[in-house]
Amino acid sequence: MTRVLFVCLGNICRSPSAEAVFRAQAEAAGLATNIDSAGTGGWHIGNPPYRPMIDAAWARGYDLTPLRARQVRARDFEDST
């Protein structure tokens, strides 16, 4: 299974948006993927995406509300094969 991790600074705008769009596109294409997002910084851990980003995504048909910020961790880069 292909694993994709989108990374930005705080994991409340860019990377969760990329995660949601890519997840929807992968599902529509019938691809088996493990998709996630994370931030390099840890100050937003556990927080939902930035409200204006949630609204902008929703207006385009993407739901960011289940997502919560987390920080990149070493196991994100371990080989899962």
Image: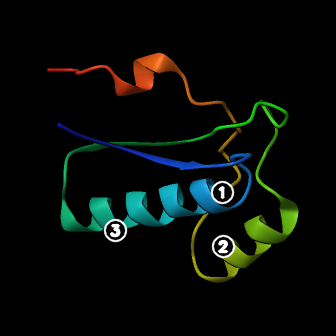
**Relative to 59, is 5 above or below?**
above
Query: Considering the numbered disc 1 on the image, is that residue within a helix, a strand or a loop?
Result: loop
Pointers 2 and 3 in contact (CB under 8 A)? Answer: no
Query: Considering the numbered disc 2 on the image, is that residue within a helix, a strand or a loop?
Result: helix
For mark 1, what is the residue? 64
Q: Position of residue 42 (x, y in %)?
A: 77, 30
Horizontal arrangement in the rendering, residue 37 relative to residue 43 (left or right): left
Q: Give the position of the C terminus as an image quadrant.
A: top left
Q: Residues within 10 Å of mark 2 (few under 14, many from 20)?
A: some
**Relative to 7, is 79 above or below?**
above
Amino acid on which disc 3 is placed:
Gln
Task: Determine the CA span between mark 1 and mark 3.
Answer: 15 Å
Q: Position of residue 14 (x, y in %)?
A: 64, 62
Q: Give the position of the N terminus as an image quadrant.
A: top left
Task: Determine the CA span between mark 2 and mark 3.
Answer: 14 Å
Pointers 1 and 2 in contact (CB under 8 A)? Answer: yes
For mark 3, what is the residue? 25
Which residue: 28% across, 67% down?
28
Amino acid on which disc 2 is placed:
Ala
Amino acid on which disc 1 is placed:
Leu
Q: Residues within 10 Å of mark 1 (few under 14, many from 20)?
A: many
Horizontal arrangement in the rendering, residue 13 relative to residue 34 (left or right): right
> Mark 2 or mark 3: which comes first in sequence?
3
Q: What color scheme is it?
A: rainbow
Residue farthest toward the bottom in the current orientation of the protein: 59
Q: Residues within 10 Å of mark 3 (few under 14, many from 20)?
A: few
Give the numbered dot on residue 57: 2
Horizontal arrangement in the rendering, residue 64 relative to residue 6 (left or right): right
> Mark 1 or mark 3: which comes first in sequence?
3
Which residue: 76% across, 52% down?
49
Task: Determine the CA span between mark 1 and mark 2.
Answer: 7 Å
